[in-house]
C-alpha cells in the first residue's frame, strides 16, 4: 500500500479522499454481508433447511383485521376490537353506550 502524504493535499482533495474511503468501507461491508449470508444459506441447506425456515423469514405479512366497532356519529372512525381502545370508544362507553351499540352490523 502506498503512503499518502496528507499534509500536502488540499482541503478539496482531503474531502474527496474522505468520501472515497467512506464509499470503499460501505462497499466492503456489503460484500462481507453477502458472503456471510451465502455461508449461512449453505449451512442451512446442508442440514436440509432453507435459511427462511430457520429465521422465520418468508412468512406472510399480517393482513389487517376487519373493523368490528364504529363511532356512533362518525362511521368513518372504526376499531377492530383488538389492541388499545380508541378515545372515542371510551368516551362513548362513559356516555352510556354499550359495546353492542357500536357494533358494525354484518349486512
Image (tube, rainbow, N blue to C red):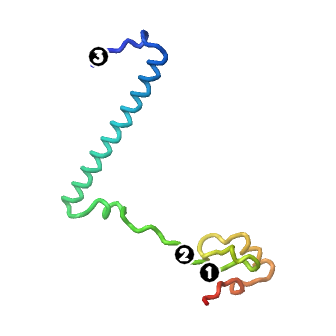
Q: Residue lying furthest left in this view?
A: 46
Q: Identify the residue at image location x=38%, y=67%.
A: 59
Q: CA distance from mark 1 to mark 2?
A: 9 Å
Q: Contact (CB < 8 A) between labels 3 and 1? A: no
Tag of residue 65:
2
In the image, residue 77 lies at what x, y percent? 69, 73
Q: CA distance from mark 2 to mark 3?
A: 62 Å
Q: Identify the residue at image location x=27%, y=19%.
A: 1
In the depicted view, which residue is nearer to us: 3 or 83?
3
Residue 85 lies left or right of residue 53; in this view the side is right
Residue 1 lies left or right of residue 25; in this view the side is left
Q: Circle 3 is placed at which residue position? A: 2
Q: Contact (CB < 8 A) between labels 1 and 2? A: yes
Judge the density around disc 3: few (<14), some (14-19), many (≥20) Cα neighbours within 10 Å: few
Kind of element beneath mark 1: loop
In the depicted view, which residue is nearer to us: 41 or 77?
77
Tag of residue 68:
1
In the depicted view, which residue is nearer to us: 13 or 30?
13
Q: Identify the residue at image location x=25%, y=50%.
A: 38
- Which of disc 1 and disc 3 is earlier in sequence? 3
Quarter of the rendering containing residue 105: bottom right
In the image, residue 86 lies at what x, y percent? 69, 70
Kind of element beneath mark 3: loop
Judge the density around disc 1: few (<14), some (14-19), many (≥20) Cα neighbours within 10 Å: some
Amino acid at each position: 500500500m502506498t503512503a499518502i502524504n496528507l499534509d500536502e493535499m488540499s482541503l478539496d482533495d482531503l474531502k474527496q479522499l474522505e468520501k472515497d474511503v467512506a464509499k470503499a468501507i460501505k462497499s466492503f461491508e456489503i460484500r462481507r454481508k453477502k458472503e456471510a449470508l451465502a455461508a449461512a444459506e449453505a449451512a442451512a441447506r446442508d442440514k436440509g433447511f432453507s435459511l427462511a425456515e430457520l429465521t422465520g423469514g418468508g412468512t406472510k405479512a399480517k393482513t389487517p383485521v376487519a373493523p368490528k366497532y364504529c363511532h356512533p356519529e362518525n362511521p368513518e372512525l372504526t376499531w377492530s376490537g383488538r389492541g388499545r381502545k380508541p378515545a372515542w370508544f371510551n368516551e362513548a362507553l362513559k356516555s352510556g353506550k354499550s359495546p353492542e351499540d357500536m357494533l358494525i352490523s354484518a349486512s
